[in-house]
Image (cartoon, rainbow, N blue to C red):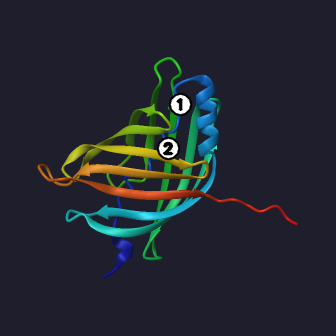
Amino acid sequence: MDYRSRRLPWSVIPLLGLLAGTAGAATTALERYVGSFSGSGTILEGPDATSHQVRCRFTILERGATSLSLQGTCRAYLIISRSISANLAWDPGSGQVTGTYTGSRVGTARLTGRQTGADFDLTIEWPKPLYGDTTAQMKVASLDQDRFRIVVTDRIGTNGPAKATTDLTLLRNLRRAPQ
């Protein structure tokens, strides 16, 4: 089977609607997620929602006081690669997080949501149906200062069960100072 022709959804990785509820908290939340990260996890792909192991690398940059930009790549089977990007902004007036995610096989998705404590709850709106509908839920959970987890849950099939279609844990790439 030629794995290079398969399209992985990477629907997950809109990841980082990671902006906070107050101006000071926004800066703190942004700083927590800015940097270089790598990690691994699973994604589901295709009409049968087949599970695949992936490894990802991301660079997350702060864009002004209330925005983030994410660029990265996820790989499976050592030969399949997908470029991922997300742009997110926090509105201090409403506390809402909005943005876009590029990298899914169905096109650019819209992201909306809010901060809940140290975590973020987002809705993904796909431009075309993915697994039978056009929405999914994303939870970004801070595990500690240098790790976070992204879980995307979607209904598989029109009346099917809700499953984690993406489950990634990302770790900050720490560089050691020369001795």
Q: Which mark is residue 139?
A: none
What crowding class fits label 1: few (fewer than 14 Cα within 10 Å), some (14-19), or many (20 or more)? many
Q: Give the answer, above or below, for where 138 lies relative to 74.
A: above
Q: Residue at x 21, y 45 (%)?
A: 133
Disc number lying in front (1 or 2): 1
Most extreme residue toward the bottom is 1
Q: Which mark is residue 16?
A: 2
Q: Position of residue 70 (x, y in %)?
A: 55, 47
Q: Position of residue 31 (x, y in %)?
A: 64, 40
Q: What amino acid is found at the position of numbered circle 2 in the picture?
A: Leu
Query: Can you identify the residue that label 1 sits on?
Result: 20
The mark total stands at 2
Q: What is the C-alpha distance between the residues marked 1 and 2?
A: 11 Å
Q: Position of residue 1 (x, y in %)?
A: 30, 82
Q: Residue at x 34, y 80 (%)?
A: 2
Q: What amino acid is found at the position of numbered circle 1 in the picture?
A: Ala
* Image position of 27 (left or right of 46): right
Q: Nearer the viewer, residue 52 or 125?
A: 52
What crowding class fits label 2: few (fewer than 14 Cα within 10 Å), some (14-19), or many (20 or more)? many
Q: Secondary structure at mark 2?
A: loop
Give residue 127's quadrant in the image. Answer: top left
